[in-house]
Amino acid sequence: MKRLPDSELEIMMIVWDLNKPVTRFEIEERMEKGRTLSPTTILSFLSRLQEKGFLEVRKSGKNNVYLALVEKEDYMQVESRNILKRLYQNSAKNFLAALYDGDSISGEDLKELEDYISMKRKEHEG
């Protein structure tokens, strides 16, 4: 699966979050406040995403609607593994240390991680 540039990923995040066939106009409405892209630019990104196999385009009346062909969870899992491999030598410990040492992890985050690890341990054992 190809890694998406930030601009295309932004479009895909909108499509995934809406979780239904969407039009260019719906995507444009959901763009981050203050971020304005021309309709032509959005259509260009949508076309690239279609070429890469991330989206399917269908006609609905006079409009094109776009459907995700790649699940958000699948993309995130692959991309997370790539980041872990490229930046942290495949070490979750190195990744967490970078977050923690940079004061990016709150006590609440640590508790959430502990609960998640505990749950995964039980699944693995049982």
Image (spheres, rainbow, N blue to C red):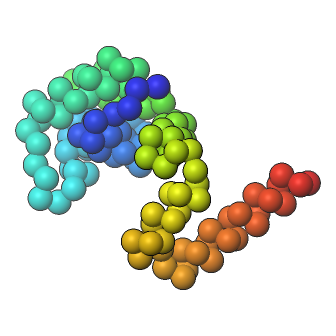
Q: Is residue 88 above or below residue 22?
A: below
Residue 92 placement, left or right of 100: right
Quarter of the figure with the C terminus: bottom right
Q: Position of residue 97 (x, y in %)?
A: 51, 65
Residue most extreme to the bottom: 107
Depth check, front residue: 65 or 112: 112
Residue at image point 70% right, 70% down: 115
Residue 63 placement, left or right of 76: left
Q: Position of residue 48 (x, y in %)?
A: 26, 23
Residue at image point 49% right, 79% down: 106
Residue at image point 21% right, 56% down: 32
Q: Position of residue 11 (x, y in %)?
A: 29, 40
Residue 92 placement, left or right of 104: right
Q: Position of residue 40 (x, y in %)?
A: 10, 30
Depth check, front residue: 76 or 69: 76
Residue most extreme to the top: 51
Q: Quadrant of residue 121?
A: bottom right
Depth check, front residue: 114 or 90: 90
Total labels: the figure holds 0
Q: From where the camera sits, is residue 61 visible?
A: no
Residue 94 placement, left or right of 16: right
Q: Is residue 100 above or below residue 36?
A: below
Residue at image point 26% right, 28% down: 46
Q: From where the camera sits, is residue 94 visible?
A: yes
Residue most extreme to the right: 126
Q: Is residue 38 above or below residue 46?
A: below
